Amino acid sequence: MELKARCVVLLAVALCSTLLLTRVAAHQEEEEPIMEMAGDMDADVEDDMEEMSLGEGLDGEPEEEDTPPGPPPVPKVTYKAPEPVGEHFFAESFDRGTLDSWVQSKAKKQDIDEDIAKYDGKWAVEDMKDSKLPGDKGLVLKSRAKHHAISAQLLRPFIFDTKPLIVQYEVNFQQGIDCGGAYVKLLSQTADLNLDEFVDKTPYTIMFGPDKCGEDYKLHFIFRHKNPKTGEYEEKHAKKPDADLRTYYTDKKTHLYTLVVNPDNSFEVLVDQTVVNSGNLLTDMTPPVNPPAEIEDPDDHKPEDWDERPKIQDPDAVKPDDWDEDAPQQIPDEDAVKPDGWLDDEPEYTSDPDAVKPEDWDEDMDGEWEAPQVPNPLCETAPGCGTWQRPMIDNPNYKGKWKAPMIDNPNYQGMWKPRKIPNPAFFEDLHPFRMTPFNAVGLELWSMSSDIFFDNFFITNERHTAERWANDGWGLKKAAEGAAEPGLVKQMMSAADERPWLWAVYVLTVALPAVLLVLFCCSGKKKAPAAADYKKTDEPQPDVEEEEKAEEDQVKEEKSQSVAAEKGDLEDSPAEKGDEEEEEEEEEEEEQQRDGEEEDENATKEKQQDDDVLRRSPRNRKVRKD
């Protein structure tokens, strides 16, 4: 009972401690929101305590605290627009609040219904709906189920030479995304480029960015490669990323998309400055940049006598004389015997004797009425009813249709393939990085979701310049979003307030291991006391006393046996020994018996005294070994 009581107490303490720690952690999360920011960011954090001090009266006296204190508001981050430093070709943060440098397309899309052909989707420059940085504006796609097209000129054309291309921008799917894209197009430098007529068929050099429809999550990197022989352009698609992209479309956070294309033909695709896809323009694009050197001859045809059969039936094989193709696969079992009591003359089903013809039965319309069939009650106790038939078994002589065995075809020529010929369209471009120069950036999109937020477009050929721009823009936004997010414990508490059943999950998840540990520690078997547990003393121990008593009993038993043997010898001895010897022996036996009784009484008294001593000693209140 004492062990069970301790287990119950420990269990209660563990549960109470778990709930108390959860509440304390949640309270700390509410009182001490933490904001982590990079050291090189130009942001000023305004202390909420200063705002509270402004609420004091004009006479310097603090206001009375009439309202109960609530959780302090999230610290505000003062936004400062990023400024481009270093070599760059395009930089746009939209913090001027206008679209003066952008051109909205006035064209119509070709080959589709006139009602949806116009690029009449609305664009606006505004803050995010749930902005953590007041004053940080961006370009927002406002319309759903419409075509949108907007573009802007670069400071100067980008020419692919000896420096890499770095393109980056930010996207936030504020309302999520069902079906639509948020990719950018780098518009090729051509003589007839007109941004007012920007459509889907306007030539571009690179298309890059996220795209989703249904459960198909894509991150495009497509470049148009010019065939040096024909002068035609063909789209080359990068392989699909191995990373899971689902989170970037569903978490409603701002993500930074970056494309890096190097002069050695390598490329990298990054999301939030983490590489999610990489490869080489020569080996990781579909279709390949360079066509094969040889192709199959389209004019070559397989000869009529070409034998592609690796195996044929042996023409020399003959069916054996004892092969019976007509033998049935199954035959009746001749060893079967009809069970005793089989009712051959009784049917399995009989007419229901209790059935009555319905009153509205019309024999002219419905025909002659017949009672429904029910199982024959006589067959319930019998092994069977009706005509008995032998069960069927597999025929041991069944062989089936005879076929000649297969042998190797001596005329086998292999699988025919058309011969290879040199590819007349073959070329080898070992520098696909040298793409068509571009001088404008554009967004040409169709989306079933609205309020897609774009911000901080940047194009450069210096990696450190792009990283600085990213830290000043997206890095600040990420830090503000992180500071505004509640801690893990607070999120768990909020979720439990909305869904009370989560409390049971928390208790089982957190408290159950502690409970199991307590039960494991309390339910162990007690070990028998070792010899070292007893106090070292010259006094006899319980086990020693038992052994001594057993030895004394054994000695007494041997003495009694020896006395009985001597007595038997005396009874069998001759009569000339005399009566005197018999009397002496009887007297000796009586003395021995008296001595034995006195020794037993002394031993019993000593045993009781020792037991009293051991019983009173707290060191020996343990279970003795059996």
Image (cartoon, rainbow, N blue to C red):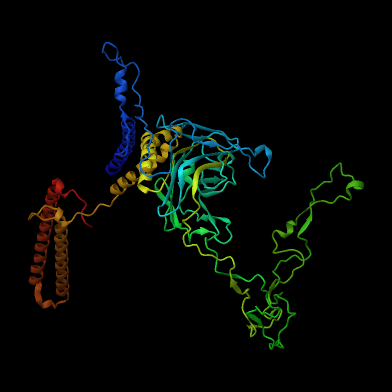
Circle count: 0
Looking at the image, which residue is at 56% across and 48% down?
203
For residue 368, above or below residue 326:
above
Which quarter of the figure has residue 214?
top right
Farthest residue to the right: give it: 364
The answer to which of 342 and 89 lies nearer the viewer is 89
Is 100 placed left or right of 329 in the picture? left
Q: Quadrant of the C terminus?
A: bottom left
Residue 355: where, in percent of width, then height? 80, 48
The answer to which of 132 and 538 lies nearer the viewer is 132
The answer to which of 31 and 303 lies nearer the viewer is 303
The answer to which of 383 and 498 lies nearer the viewer is 498
Residue 614: where, in percent of width, then height? 14, 49
Farthest residue to the top: give it: 59
Residue 522: where, in percent of width, then height? 28, 47
For residue 62, above or below residue 338:
above
Residue 359: where, in percent of width, then height? 86, 42
Looking at the image, which residue is at 55% across and 64% down?
291
Is 98 placed left or right of 41 in the picture? right
Q: Quadrant of the N terminus?
A: top left
Is 481 placed left or right of 445 in the picture? left
Is 250 placed left or right of 552 in the picture? right
Looking at the image, which residue is at 40% across and 32% down?
132
